[in-house]
Image (spheres, rainbow, N blue to C red):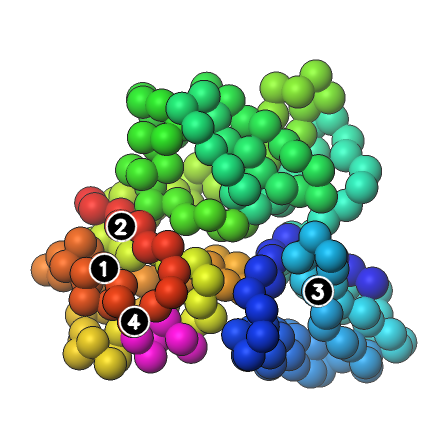
Amino acid sequence: MVVLATKCYVAGEARDRALDGMGSLLADALGELAVDYEAGVRRDEFVAVTVEGDDAPAARSLLAEQWGTITDHFDDGETYTGTLESWDDDGFVLDAGREIEIDTDGLGLGVGSATQIRDRFGLVQHTPLSFVYDADGDHELAESTRDRLYDWQRGDGRVNVNNATRAEVRAAVNRAGHGRDIVTVERQGLLEQSVRCRAGTDPPGLLAAIGGRLPAELKCVVP
């Protein structure tokens, strides 16, 4: 079994749709390998995938590369992935199978409190973020995560969404009549998406247009 660093925190039909979508993603990723697989959800809401077959080691490595994994063992100086659980002015708390506290200086994302940084980079709850583990507790966001977030600010704007699959976000954008105003919907996690705006699109305006169609937290990235 491999536990992916993404959560499924919805219930009922929404969970069924999310797991159906996860099944499609697994089929795309593992379809050429000699494996059988099944996705489920652990009690802590992380997605767990059972993989069996001749190519199981390769399949697990591929899933770890694409999604990151949750582990119960951490080595000093190594990079892991957690999901944004909570925040306050002093820092972020990631869920990586255990709580990982990253203070504002460890974020490495410029001036301001951690709450202001979250708002500036449009981070919604449960977004997967990579971090460098420190045995003394001085954890830091990984350079790859910092680069990704700074790239968001250098683009034409974004609207970030949680609590919805990529297909649900695309459908909401299209129903609102804004399909031509976006470049694509980028998957951040199973239920966390980032809508890339086209040049000239106003991210707060797009958020207002689709917000009522999604039972989600939405945040803007304004370039």
Q: Which residues are magenta?
A: 167-172
72 on left or right of 19? right
Marks 1 and 2 in Cβ contact (< 8 Å): yes
Q: Quadrant of the N terminus?
A: bottom right
The residue that disc 2 covers is 220
Disc 2 marks a residue whose amino acid type is: Cys
Mark 1 or mark 2, which has the lower sequence index?
1
Marks 2 and 4 in Cβ contact (< 8 Å): no
64 on left or right of 171? right
Measured Cα–Cα span from mark 2 to mark 3: 29 Å
Q: Could you tell me residue 62's position as x and y percent? A: 69, 63
Measured Cα–Cα span from mark 3 to mark 4: 26 Å
User: SS for tag 3?
Assistant: strand
**Up-down relation of residue 167 to residue 160 (above or below):** below
Which residue occupies 70% across, 52% down? 44
| Residue neighbourhood size for the residue with mark 3, other residues' Cα within 10 Å, grouped as few (<14), some (14–19), many (≥20) | some
Disc marking residue 41? 3
User: SS for tag 4?
Assistant: loop
Of 121 and 214, nearer the camera is 214
Disc 3 marks a residue whose amino acid type is: Val
The residue that disc 4 covers is 213
Measured Cα–Cα span from mark 4 to mark 1: 10 Å
- Secondary structure character of the magenta stretch overall: helix
Q: Could you tell me residue 126's position as x and y percent? A: 51, 50
Which residue occupies 60% across, 57% down? 6
User: SS for tag 2?
Assistant: strand
102 on left or right of 55? left
Measured Cα–Cα span from mark 1 to mark 2: 7 Å
Q: Is residue 134 magenta?
A: no
- The answer to whether residue 122 of the structure is visible from this angle is yes
Q: Quadrant of the C terminus?
A: top left
